[in-house]
Amino acid sequence: MDALDGNAIGGTLIDVFGAEMTTASSTCGTCGASRPVADLAVYMRAPGTVVRCPTCDSVLMVFVKAHGVTCAVDLAGMTSLNRAGPSLSSGTGSGTYPYA
Ligand SMILES: [Zn+2]
């Protein structure tokens, strides 16, 4: 089974996170390797998409598409996923997260 790279799921990530995430920085929860999402190993086998750490092969993310909606069913393999853009925390101005 050949792995694709994170760019293969750019559209999926936009569906799930509502933002371009291939340039986001991910950190593997198993080996601590940090790299852009675009550099992760992606295995697309219906009905799910599995994203693995290229360093230790741990599962970082699992996406499943059901009824036309893509859901992130498991993000537990990562310790962090940080988008390198300016608007992640400032959001769209309508955020209600009680950060303060
Ligand atoms: Zn790893």
Image (cartoon, grey):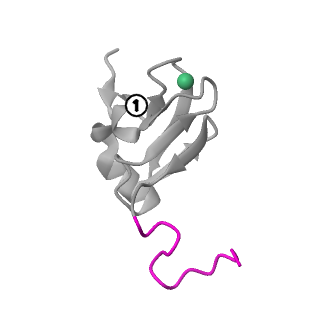
Helix, strand or loop at label 1? It is loop
Report whether 76 appears left or right of 40.
right
Report the span colored magenta. Answer: 86-100
x, y (%) of residue 70? 44, 52
Q: Quadrant of ligand 1?
A: top right
Please report the residue visible at 63 percent of the width from the left and 32 percent of the height from the top.
29
Nearer to the camera, 96 or 16: 96
On the image, the x and y values in percent for residue 58 come to 56, 23
From the image, which quarter does the N terminus lie in? top left
**Residue 55 visible:** yes
Residue that extends furthest to the top in the rendered view of this protein: 1
Residue 68 visible (yes or no): no
Q: Residues within 10 Å of mark 1 (few under 14, many from 20)?
A: many
**What main secondary structure does the magenta stretch of the protein show?**
loop
User: In which image quadrant can residue 67 be found?
Assistant: bottom left
Is residue 88 on the magenta stretch? yes
Q: Is residue 69 above or below residue 94?
A: above
Q: Is residue 90 left or right of residue 9?
A: right
Q: Residue at x 34, y 56 (%)?
A: 20
Residue highlighted by disc 1: 40
> Disc 1 marks which amino acid?
Leu
Residue 7 vertical placement versus 16 (above, below)? above
Specify whether residue 97 is painted magenta: yes
Percent across and percent down for residue 54 are 44, 21
Nearer-the-camera pick, 13 or 65: 13
Residue at image position (28%, 40%) is 7
Residue visible at 31% across and 17% down? 2
